[in-house]
């Protein structure tokens, strides 16, 4: 259903503690499972530090690269009153799921969040980012996705190993996995004096419903949103969605036309059904733009992208509290950092860590 904006004030920015940007890297000593050590790649860094990069078993084959068939398409109406975006990203979501070794319900929650972040960031400046963070009381605990205007996205879930029975309708129970809580959205750009922050209460935990509620309630943009991740045999088979938004100068006639197009597309099936039937992102956009004059399409190949590396780890370690580092070194005689977005492990010995702190 197409939702109209409601009259409400922009939510107060009083949740800064909650809205703090998610950690790209978290540090902790990790007891590796017996037999889990796989061949690693080593990098020589200044000060002769040797940082153990990601183990090969954890690196997805398509990390930081576009996958054939994945596409994000944005179209603006000729009168500049309607924006339509559609995405097919089955390969990207499959990569993310495999990278995090996610169960079907965790893969669905993560995939929908990645799709939503990409749709919200599309059409923005290349380096403008959109970060979405679901904090719920469900077993997933958290679902985070960060995308930029170039079509790069990354994310994680708090517990990718969550197992839940399907709903009565036989669907993945994403709503129960997420639970009740809050959705925080942070838009930022390096040239801005401060980011824009919005926070709304989670409505259903199904991701799409909650992002739509955020758009209508916090950004006051009449929108239609559909997201889908189809998992079969433990693997992501299809993932995609669309976002339609009406801009301030749109007319009631335009609203009626858009609502009818959305209704007709919904009759053909969910986003994943459309993809499995052979439709691509351009096909979906064209269906949503029936009888609406359009300008040229903007096409981007999205990719699951992570920018963690050894130098970032070194900078992070240098900023950590000394007493916390010393405590970890006494317990484990080494310092390990794991990237929450791609699972990469980085390791510093006790001597190397203390040398880095001295130099810092």
Image: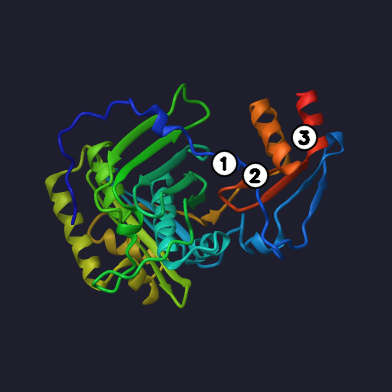
Tell me, yes or no, if residue 88 can be seen here. Answer: no
Furthest residue in direction front, as rendered: 331
Check disc 3 and report the residue beneath it. Answer: 353
Residue at the location (65% across, 49% down)? 30
Q: Which label lies toward us, 3 or 2?
A: 3
Q: Which label was assigned to residue 278?
A: none
Q: Disc 1 vs disc 2: Cβ atoms closer than 8 Å?
A: yes
Front label number (3 vs 1): 3
Real-space CA distance between mark 1 and mark 2, rounded to the nearest whole angstrom? 8 Å
Q: Which mark is residue 24?
A: 1
Residue at left offset 47%, top offset 74%: 234
- First along the sequence among labels 3 and 1: 1
Mark 2, residues whose alpha carbon is within 10 Å: few (<14), some, or many (≥20)?
some
Q: Is residue 120 left or right of residue 311?
A: left
- In-front residue for pair 72/116: 116
Query: Can you give x and y, in whole percent of width and height, for residue 207 in the image?
Result: 33, 53
Residues at circles 3 and 2 in contact by the CB criterion of under 8 Å: no
Q: Image height check: is 172 above or below 213?
A: below
Q: Position of residue 115 (x, y in %)?
A: 41, 55
Question: Which element type, helix, strand or loop, lies under badge 1?
Answer: loop
Q: Earlier in the sequence, mark 3 or mark 2?
A: 2
The residue shown at (25%, 66%) is 265
The color scheme shown is rainbow
What distance separates the C-alpha of mark 3 from that of mark 1?
Answer: 20 Å
Q: Earlier in the sequence, mark 1 or mark 2?
A: 1
Foreground residue among 262 and 239: 239
Mark 3 falls on what kind of element? Answer: helix
Q: Is residue 12 visible?
A: yes
The residue lying toward the viewer, choosing from 15 and 89, is: 15
Which label sits on residue 308? 2
Label 2: which secondary element: loop
């Amino acid at each position: 259903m197409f939702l109209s904006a409601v009259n409400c004030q922009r939510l107060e920015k009083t949740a800064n503690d909650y809205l703090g940007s998610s950690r790209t890297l978290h540090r902790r000593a990790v007891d590796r499972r017996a037999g889990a050590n796989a061949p690693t790649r080593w990098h020589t860094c200044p000060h002769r530090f040797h940082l153990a990069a990601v183990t090969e078993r954890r690196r997805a084959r398509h990390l930081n690269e576009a996958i054939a068939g994945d596409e994000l398409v944005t179209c603006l109406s000729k009168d500049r009153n309607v924006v339509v975006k559609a995405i097919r990203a089955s390969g990207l979501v499959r990569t993310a799921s495999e990278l995090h070794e996610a169960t079907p319900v965790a893969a669905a929650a993560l995939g929908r969040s990645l799709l939503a972040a990409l749709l919200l960031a599309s059409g923005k400046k290349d380096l403008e980012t959109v970060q979405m963070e679901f904090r719920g009381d469900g077993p997933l605990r958290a679902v985070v996705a960060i995308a930029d205007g170039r079509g790069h996205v990354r994310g994680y879930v708090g517990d990718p190993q969550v197992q839940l029975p399907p709903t009565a309708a036989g669907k993945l129970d994403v709503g129960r996995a997420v639970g009740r809580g809050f959705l925080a959205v942070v838009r930022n750009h390096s040239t801005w004096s401060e980011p824009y922050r919005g926070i709304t209460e989670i409505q259903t935990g199904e991701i799409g419903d909650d992002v739509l509620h955020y758009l209508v309630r916090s950004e006051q943009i009449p929108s239609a949103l559909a997201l889908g991740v189809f998992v079969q045999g433990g693997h992501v088979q299809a993932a995609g969605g669309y976002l339609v938004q009406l801009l301030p100068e749109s007319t009631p006639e335009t609203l009626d036309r858009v609502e009818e197009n959305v209704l007709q597309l919904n009759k053909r099936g969910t986003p994943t059904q459309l993809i499995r039937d052979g439709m691509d992102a351009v096909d979906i956009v064209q269906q949503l733009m029936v009888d609406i004059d359009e300008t040229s399409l903007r096409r981007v190949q999205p990719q699951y992208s992570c920018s963690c590396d050894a130098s970032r780890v070194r900078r992070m370690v240098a900023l950590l509290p000394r007493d916390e580092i010393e405590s970890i070194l006494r317990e484990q005689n080494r310092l390990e950092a794991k990237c929450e977005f791609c699972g990469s492990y980085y390791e510093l010995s006790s001597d190397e860590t203390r040398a880095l702190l001295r130099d810092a």
